[in-house]
Image (cartoon, helix red, strand yellow):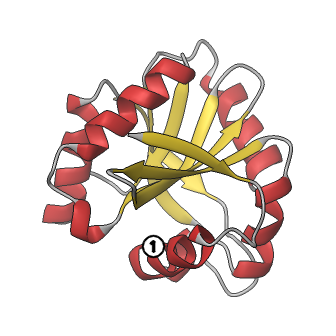
Amino acid sequence: MEFLQITSTEDYRVKEIFEAYCKTFPEDERRDWDKLSPLFSHPKVKIISVLHEAKNIGYLIIWELSNFAFVEHFEVFEEFRSQKLGSHITNYLFGNYPRIVLEIEHGHLTEDTKRRYSFYQKNGFSLIDEMYVQPSYGEGKNPLNLWLLANYQPENLKEVKDEIYDIVYH
């Protein structure tokens, strides 16, 4: 498995990633293109294409913050799911980022959300905040009640959330 950072919107994988991003994540859970495209060259962001057997199978959008990494989006493309590839991706994350925080939909809403929550639990993440609110991604988009998960126990959860709000959702 290869993990390649994409630093330009001209990269041939960007179109496939953006199409999957729009298909998978509802409007309120994602950035519009004009807000996503600057992230490819943002100094705190890594947009990583995940390759397996020479095929682009997914991507990560990671913010490298003060003392933790915030995984804004993590997707294995639909045709590659249920093949244990997501666990290989979490191994990559753990090998490169000792402290990881991410958001998910409440783990009891649907079969998909239960499955996702179970996946993260099996891969070393724990629920750290059930009352987390993802700010709006912009005009016409709603804030969302989500859960915050991490692979460690933050000493000061408020500081973690404030940094996410100030830098990721500025």
User: Left or right: where does residue 27 sit relative to residue 111?
Assistant: right
Label 1 neighbourhood size at 10 Å, few (<14), some (14-19), many (20+)? Answer: few
Q: Residue at x 38, y 40 (%)?
A: 1
Q: Residue furthest top?
A: 155
Q: Position of residue 139 (x, y in %)?
A: 76, 83
Q: Residue at x 56, y 54 (%)?
A: 133
User: Left or right: where does residue 72 sit relative to residue 112?
Assistant: right
Instruction: Identify the element where label 1 is drawn.
Output: loop
Q: Position of residue 54 (x, y in %)?
A: 39, 55
Which residue position is annotated with label 1? 25
Place residue 40 in its image quadrant. bottom right
User: In this orientation, which residue lies closer to the viewer: 113 or 3?
Assistant: 3
Q: Residue at x 34, y 66 (%)?
A: 77
Residue 170 visible from this viewpoint: no
Q: Residue furthest bottom?
A: 140
Place residue 79 in its image quadrant. bottom left
Q: Residue at x 81, y 45 (%)?
A: 167
Q: Position of residue 125 (x, y in %)?
A: 35, 28
Q: Residue furthest front?
A: 54
User: In this orientation, which residue lies closer to the viewer: 59 or 35?
Assistant: 59
User: Left or right: where does residue 115 sit relative to residue 35?
Assistant: left
Q: Amino acid at mark 1?
A: Phe
Residue 131 visible from this viewpoint: yes
User: Left or right: where does residue 144 sit relative to residue 12?
Assistant: left
The number of numbered badges drawn on the structure is: 1
User: In this orientation, which residue lies closer to the viewer: 110 or 33?
Assistant: 33
